[in-house]
Amino acid sequence: MRKTISHLTLAVSALFIGAGAVNQGVSGFLLALPFVAGFILTLKAFPLKGKVGYIAVVTILSIPLAWSHEENKIIYPWL
């Protein structure tokens, strides 16, 4: 049960970190900081391979979302 809760916490934290990356404003970044802290604290329960894997997945998924809307026509084609 504890492992399931840890996985859910990581998933929710990753979701809100991604939402902060999409917002691209100061408020989006600041609103995502508590979820970054929760993500890091939750990672303590996982082995090193899990920590590296989760950090890599969240980073890879957040980088394209943080690209400028005007320059990124692949992810934001409607703008």
Image (tube, grey):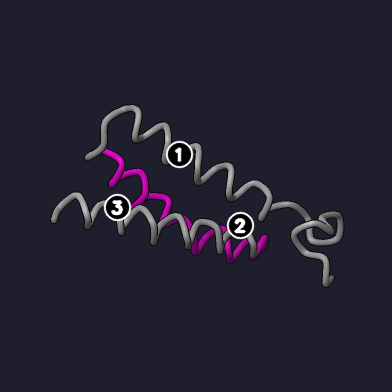
Q: Helix, strand or loop at disc 2?
A: helix
Horizontal and vertical percent for residue 15? 47, 61
Q: Main secondary structure of the magenta part?
A: helix
Q: Earlier in the sequence, mark 2 or mark 1?
A: 2
Mark 2 nearby-residue class (10 Å; few <14, some 14–19, many ≥20): many
Q: Helix, strand or loop at disc 3?
A: helix
Front residue of this view, candidates 3 and 39? 3
Pointer 2 residue: 21
Q: In the rendered image of this protein, does residue 75 appear above or below residue 45? A: below
- Residue at 62% x, 61% y is 26
Indicate the amino acid at tag 3. Answer: His
Q: In the rendered image of this protein, does residue 70 appear above or below residue 43? A: below
The quarter of the picture where residue 11 lies is bottom left
Mark 1 nearby-residue class (10 Å; few <14, some 14–19, many ≥20): some
Q: CA distance from mark 3 to mark 1?
A: 13 Å
Q: Quadrant of the N terminus?
A: bottom left
Horizontal and vertical percent for residue 4? 22, 55
